[in-house]
Image: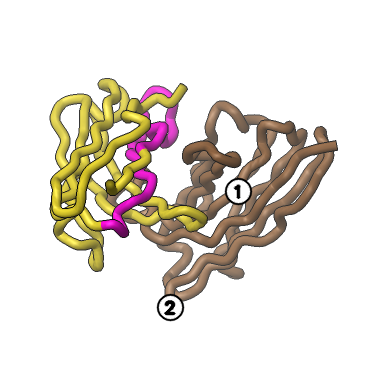
Chain colours: A yellow, B brown
Amino acid sequence: QSVLTQPPSASGTPGQRVTVSCSGSSSNIGSNTVSWYQQLPGTAPKLLIYSNDQRPSGVPDRFSGSKSGTSASLAISGLQSEDEAGYYCAAWDDSLIGVVFGGGTKLTVL
Amino acid sequence: EVQLLESGGGLVQPGGSLRLSCAASGFTFSTYAMTWVRQAPGKGLEWVSAISGSGGSTYYAHSVKGRFTISRDNSKNTLYLQMNSLRAEDTAVYYCAKTTVTSYSAFDIWGQGTMVTVSS
């Protein structure tokens, strides 16, 4: 059971906008920033979003992040077939004194 | 080119030990905290351990505390993970990752991963 809660799956058609939620608590998302990762099959994860809503250079602006209270969301607009991947949220947890990940959301592009 | 290259994975019996290494290049290694993250077959990501740039601060997941030791040699630009008393549930791909300066949960550079299999 992961400390951060994500839906196990999500789906959308090309061009659509999809969101992935990440729910935590006051000791993690509520008091620290959230990061998001994309993991394509058979590859290492890639940082998509850091500090809740910042994109590293090279990440398309179709990807955006937001945070409110103890929850965060990743939005993908203009969905493309290459976006089919696993998506993970992460945050530092002040109680556990470590990083916690969500269980991951598998995104399918129909 | 910024790069991380893990090595040291393999097959080990339950109760055994293994030391993973992660060679860094293309950035000032000592400036950044470093992290180990693992992924069991078919499962999600699990944070394992982190170490500050100087090596003076270390952090561990509850599942590995007391069995794993993270360390670094800044003169060799290398990160290590000493794994003792290994269990079947430690079987996973182990990734080393560079932590950004803004957040201990933001890992902007990842290695390709090294597989650790704990089995008799």
Vertical relation: A71 (above or below) B54? above
User: Residue at coordinates 53% horizontally, 32% vertically from top-left?
Assistant: B61
Q: Dividing the picture into quarters, in which one does residue A33 lie?
A: top left
Determine crowd level at label 2: few under 14, some 14-19, many 20+ residues with C-alpha closer than 10 A. Answer: few
In the image, residue A87 lies in the stretch drawn in magenta: yes
Q: Which residue is mark 2?
A: B1
Residue A4 percent across, percent down from the top left? 35, 27
Magenta part of the protein: which range?
A: A81-105
Horizontal arrangement in the rendering, residue A42 relative to residue B114 (left or right): left
Residue at 61% from the left image edge and 61% from the top image edge: B6
- The quarter holding residue A82 reads bottom left
Identify whether B20 is placed above or below B117.
below
Task: Provide the residue designation for mark 1.
Answer: B93
Horizontal side of residue A107 vs B3, given as left or right = left
Amino acid type of the residue tagged 1 in the rendering? Val
On screen, residue A77 above or below A97: below
The answer to whether residue A54 of the structure is visible from this angle is no
Q: Earlier in the sequence, mark 1 or mark 2?
A: 2
Compare residues B20 and B115 and report the one nearer the observer.
B115
